[in-house]
Image: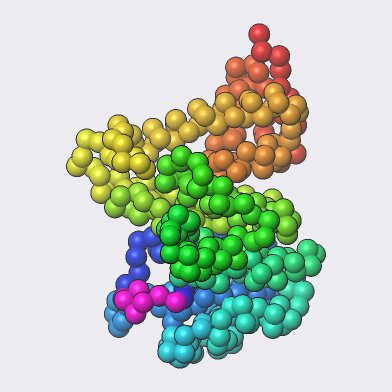
Amino acid sequence: MSIPSNSFFERKREWSRRKHDVLSGYLPQFTRILGQYHGRIYAVDGFAGRGYYGEDEERESGSPLLFAEIAAKLENYQLRCINVEVVRKEFENLQIATAPYLSHIDNRFGSFDRNVESILRDIGQSPTFFFLDPFGLKGLEWETMSKVGNRYKGFKTELLINFNAPKFDRDAGWLDSRYERKRDSFLRRLDKVMGPSSNWRGIFDKDSSREERYREIATPYKSGLENEFGFIASIFPIRTVEDGSLKYYLIHAARHPLGRRIIGHIFYGVHQQYLRARAILLQQGGVQLGLDGIAVPKLSIEQMEEEDLKLLVQDVLGALLERGPMHFGELQDYLADKWVGRMVEKHYRSACNQLRTRGVVSWSGTTLKEDTLLQPLPIR
């Protein structure tokens, strides 16, 4: 993460912990799966910062140290971590912090956009996981992303991006400003992030809630990754425990459905942690505030999941009636955009079994497998 104020690294915030839980859960699996067939695996932290939060006994690892620690533990694999940092003082701190892991890391001074071409040359054909976590939006310009996205599709490439939709929303507030010079400066920056094919300004012509706008801002960025570079992308919200407000989205991009399935399970686990933390904070109150400040009845985590499962059952049946027979794996991929991070394979199994019991879906055998063909039946 760079470039923050000096106070940012005083302690690790609860939302940063969940972001790092995603990293700690996913990178080892990425390495183990691809490391079976390839030699060296790379993890690139494009906005590394100094590598840690806090000082002395309160010091906690940031993403560069998390990556290095993972590489050291996976001793049967060749995971090499490239860290990029643009602030000289923070780069010097990063060098000191990562010194115990010299055999696993490669620290590079400068901005990610200035380093990306040399990184792409150096990683060659190796599978590479890019973690792009800027402070705000600077560094996610479409021109820079295109260099990564246009990497040959046969080379395994995945990304996890911190996309700060609230920051974008605030900057887009200049659309109606009378101060042309400042307005045009902000809008040019947003155009560079979203790319030439995006019509993001239309989002602000509608009477949408703030939460709806946030999602509508992130969606075209995700769609650009899919349409222009052939990625399969997923959006996952990172919210504060205190009031549920959105800090940013994590956008994961892979080129194989398995990547989305695995990250979906990790998102689900992190989401459950968030719900438990929020429940503890709110356990003294009779109601909680929804995302738009509206009081809603307090539900247990189990009750919320039951409600989601009811909706998933409807979506599964709707997909089969609309598209016809589908394999179980194909069905999960088809509905992933809506349910990633909230419903995982066990929920899809439950939904299919409920529909089978109702006599509206059938399949051969007793166990649902990836290639099990689900058949919709006429509804009487």
Residue 187 visible within the image: yes
Magenta-highlighted residues: 3-10
Asked if residue 230 lies left or right of residue 354, the reply is right
| Secondary structure that dominates the magenta span | helix
Asked if residue 149 lies left or right of residue 219, the reply is right
Asked if residue 202 lies left or right of residue 63, the reply is right
Residue 315 x/y as whole percent: 59, 29
Asked if residue 226 lies left or right of residue 314, the reply is right
Residue 61 located within the stretch drawn in magenta: no
Residue under the image location 61 percent in, 77 percent down? 113
Residue 29 x/y as whole percent: 60, 62
Residue 254 visible within the image: no
Residue 364 x/y as whole percent: 74, 27
Residue 257 x/y as whole percent: 69, 50
- Depth check: give the residue in front, 150 or 11: 150
- Depth check: give the residue in front, 123 or 47: 47
Residue lying furthest top in this view? 380
Residue under the image location 47 percent in, 50 percent down? 214
Residue under the image location 43 percent in, 64 percent down? 179
What is the total number of numbered labels drawn onto the structure image?
Answer: 0
Which quadrant is the C terminus positioned in? Answer: top right
